Amino acid sequence: MKLNDTARFSTVCIHAGQEPDPSTGAITVPIYQTSTYVQEGLGQHKGFEYGRTQNPTRMALEANVAAIEGGIAGFVFASGMAAIDTLLTRLESGDHLVVSDNTYGGTFRLFERVRRKFGLDFSYVDTSRHDLIDAAIIARTKYLFIETPTNPMLRITDLRAASDLAHQRNVRVIVDNTFASPYIQRPLDFGADIVVHSTTKFLNGHSDSVGGIIVLRHQDDAEWMKFVQNAAGAILGPMDSWLVLRGTKTLPIRMERTNANAQTLAEYLASHSRVERVIYPGLPDHPHHTLAKRQMRGFGGLISFDVGSVDRAREVLGRFRLMSLAESLGGVETLISHPAIMTHASVPPERRAAIGITEGMIRISVGIEDVEDLREDLEQALR
Ligand SMILES: *Cc1c(COP(=O)(O)O)cnc(C)c1O
C-alpha cells in the first residue's frame, strides 16, 4: 500500500506507515514482541539488530503519526513526559526556554524540579499574549514551548503569530498538541518546528496505554532525537505501539463525536443556574473564541466549569454515575476531575491562583458516549 501525496487526513490516519506484513500479508502490523533479531552472518542483517534500536511495530507507529502531523520523522517514548524530557537533551546548560504559564503540571515539575538542576532556565508567560512572549525572549532562549489549549484554563495561543515572532528571534517552537490532537490542529502547518504528544490521551484514545511521541520538521532535530531515543533508551514497547496504532485509525471519527458532544455539554452547562462559569473555546464568550474558530477544527473535548467552592465541587463530583472520577483525558469514556486537588496538585497554590485555577473548578474530558446520557448525568449531579 503506497499512500499517494494527495491522500486526505482520514486516509492517512488509517494507512500511513502500514504496509501489509511482508511474510504473511497480515493487514494490521503485527506486535513484534522480540528483543533481538537473528543475523545471517557477521555484519549481515535485515536492518534490525536489537529491540531498543529498531522495532517494526514501533517504527510503523512513528511513521504513522509523523504523517498525521505532517512532519519528516517521529519518535515514540515510554510516556509523554519521557518525550518532553528527550526534547530538552537538544539544549546545553545555560540555555533558556519560554513556556506557556498554564502548562501541564508534570511538565512544570520536570522543568523546575529536575532540569533546572542541570542548568536549564525557564520563564513562564501567558503565550496567548505576544507582547509577553516578546518580552520573555532573551539571548539565551532556544525554545518557545507552547501548550494550546492549556489545561484547564483552555487559553489559546495563535500558533502562526507565535511561530513568526519566535523565528524572527532565532528561537524554535515546540507545541504540546496533546489537548487538541492533530485532527483539531496541526502545529507544523502554522510554522511550529516540533510537535510533542502524550499518546496516552487522544491518539491512543482507549485509556489502555501510556506513551509519548515527538514529531520533527528539521533534519538536524530528527537525527539528534533518533540518536537519543536509542542512547537514553526510553522507548515505547511493541504492545503499546500497536495499541496506539490501533487508536489513530479512528482518530477522525472519535474527534468529530468528541467535538459535538463537548459543544452540546458546554452549552448546557452555560445555561445551568448552579454553574458559575464555563470555560470552553466553542462558547462565544470565550476570550479566544474567534482565534479558536480560525485555528482549530472544532473546539476539542475539554470543558472546565466552576461550581463556586471546594465543598460544592466535592458534593457534585461524588454524585456522577456515568462519568468517572479520574486523571487523564482523551479516551472514549468521559472523565471528570478536580484540577486543584488532582492534576495540578504539584503546582504551588499561589501559582494556581495566578493562573485562575479555582477550588470550585471541575474539568470534564468528554468521551464519545451518547450525549443525552452524559447530559442527564450532569443534570442529576448538579441538582
Ligand atoms: C498527559 C500529558 C502529558 C504527559 O504525558 P504522560 O503520557 O502522562 O507522561 C504532557 N502534556 C500534556 C498536555 C498532557 O495532557
Image (tube, rainbow, N blue to C red):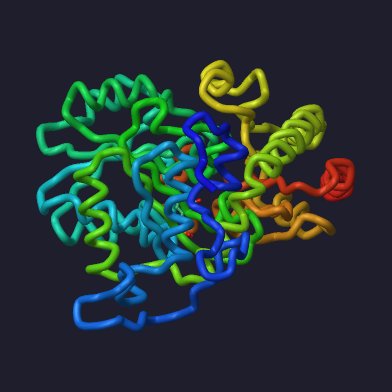
**Quarter of the image where one finds residue 318:** bottom right
Image coords of residue 256 (percent x, y): 70, 36
Image coords of residue 227 (percent x, y): 22, 60
Question: Quick check: 269 left or right of 144?
Answer: right
Image coords of residue 186 (percent x, y): 47, 33
Vertically, is 350 above or below 298? below
The residue lying at 18 percent from left, 39 percent from top is 142
For this rendering, which residue is in front, 75 or 32? 32
For this rendering, which residue is in front, 212 or 136? 212
Image coords of residue 168 (percent x, y): 20, 21
Vertically, is 283 above or below 187? above
**Quarter of the image where one finds residue 239:** bottom right
For this rendering, which residue is in front, 209 or 244? 244
Say if residue 101 shows up in the picture: no
The residue lying at 68 percent from left, 46 percent from top is 364
Image quarter in which the C terminus is found:
top right
For this rendering, which residue is in front, 200 or 14? 14
Vertically, is 60 above or below 284? below
Question: Quick check: 72 left or right of 197?
Answer: left
Say if residue 371 shows up in the picture: yes
The residue lying at 12 percent from left, 52 percent from top is 92
Q: How many marks?
A: 0
The residue lying at 44 percent from left, 53 percent from top is 105
Question: Quick check: 147 left or right of 339?
Answer: left
Question: Quick check: 352 left or right of 191?
Answer: right
